[in-house]
Amino acid sequence: MVWINLNDLNRNPHFIVHYCICLFSLIKAMFLNVRSLVDLDPEPDLRVEGGGQAGPPSGRAHGDLSLLRRSSLEDREKEIREKGSEILREQLDAAKKELKLKDKECERLSQVRNQLEQELEELTASLFEEAHKMVREANVKRAASEKRLKEAQGKIDVLQAEVTALKTLVLTSTPSSPNRQLHPQLQSPSTRGAYKHHSRNKSMSGTIPSLAGRAEPSSVSIQPVSKEEREMDSVLYAEFLLWKENPSLERSSAFLSRVYSEDVGPCLSFTRSELSQRVQSAVESNSLTIEPVAVSAPPVVKASATECGGPKKCALSGMSRLCRHRIKLGDKGSYHFISPSSRARIAAVCNFFTYIRYIQQGLVRHDAEQMFWEVMRLRREMTTARLGFYVADQG
């Protein structure tokens, strides 16, 4: 006898086929047992009345009975076999159907597993890619931050140097003229502070002796007006305060518009008007260079002598004067020789623009009134230089 566990059938459909085969073998064995029992059945005793034994029946009757029994057994065997076969076919079909269902379920689960594995791989790749992307972005941001930090440190160093220079300018040059080292574009002292006369004025040359060893000698000097002797113009002061709220170099403000029309424009108005406009533009953009030139050395210029002048002819006024300085407009411009008077006028305008740039950058820590009087002093210097008063450069 073969025992089949139903739990095994539920877990594995292949056991159903094995179960059907075993069941078919069992039914076949039952058929064989039944047939053997029928064959072994003894023939009935024929006894005669009176206790005696009758003789054997006739051969024909015995043969008919055997055929009848054999036919009945064959019919029963056939019927049982057909029923068993039908049961086996039904069970086999059911097993096949269940096996197909299990195969489909296994296939579906396999597809789900493959899909999950693919999604897991894609997710892992995406996570790694995102991580690498974040690392790259972090590295780029760090490099940019380090670059900005270096630039900021450089700017801080420059601003600290400018603040130091401005402090020196405020402490040592206000209200007198600024130090020449703080304005390398000027290359020589300018008339800042008091009215100073031309060195050719012989009548006033002996009133105040020059100081030995100074780079800025003056033959005549007028003492600056004391604070008690000054009187502030309310209109000019109001225009300056309005400009100081939002300082800029644009001419749209009333303050700078007045300075341009009354001081800057007339001070930079020379005979050569085209070159004068270029000089004014260079001063406004802070790209003008003034440098001394050796008189004995032959001039080396790219343009013609008429345009740039020469050591003995001013390129701005066109007058024959000994030119100790030359100017350059921008980095790629030509050199133009200028007379001492023209240089003094340009230097006065440069001083004014330098100071208002300091105010615009927030480097001047004085109050509004002190700034206003410094601006008025610089305007006075432009007027003085425009009228022809300047300090002769001996260095």
Image (spheres, rainbow, N blue to C red):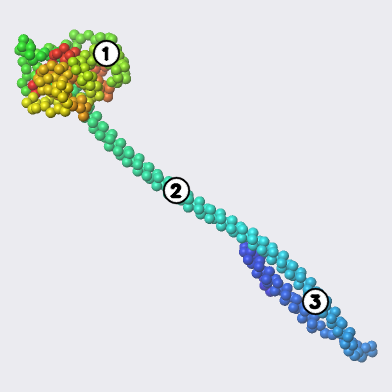
Select label 3 or label 2 by which is in front: 3
Name which quarter of the figure residue 57 lies in.
bottom right
- The three-letter amino acid code for the residue at tag 2 is Leu
Q: Residue at x 25, y 20 (%)?
A: 356
Ranked by sequence position, the earlier of labels 1 and 2 is 2
Going from N to C along the chain, the mark reached first, 3 or 2, is 3
Residue contact between numbered discs 3 and 1, judged by CB atoms under 8 Å: no
In this orientation, does residue 251 appear? yes
Q: Are marks 3 and 2 in contact (CB under 8 Å)?
A: no
Residue at the image position 18 percent from the left and 8 percent from the top: 229
- Tell me where residue 214 appears, x and y as whole percent: 8, 22
Residue hosting label 3: 74
Q: Secondary structure at mark 1?
A: helix
Q: Label 1 belongs to which residue? A: 258
How far across and how far down the image is residue 250, in percent?
30, 19
- Mark 3 falls on what kind of element? helix
Residue in the image at 83% along x and 78% along y: 71
> How packed is label 2: few (under 14 Cα within 10 Å), some, or many (20 or more)?
few
Q: Is residue 158 above or below residue 50?
A: above
Which mark is nearer the camera, 3 or 1?
1
Residue placed most toward the observer, 163 or 358: 358
Cβ atoms at labels 1 and 2 below 8 Å apart: no
Determine the CA span between mark 3 and mark 2: 76 Å
Which residue matches tag 2? 127
- Residue drawn where x is 29% and y is 12% of the image: 238
- Mark nearest the camera among 1 and 2 is 1
Left or right: where does residue 274 sit relative to residue 137? left
How many angstroms separate mark 3 from mark 1 (CA)?
139 Å
- Residue situated in front as seen by the camera: 177 or 100: 100
Q: Position of residue 351 (x, y in %)?
A: 20, 20
> Percent position (x, y) of residue 343?
15, 20
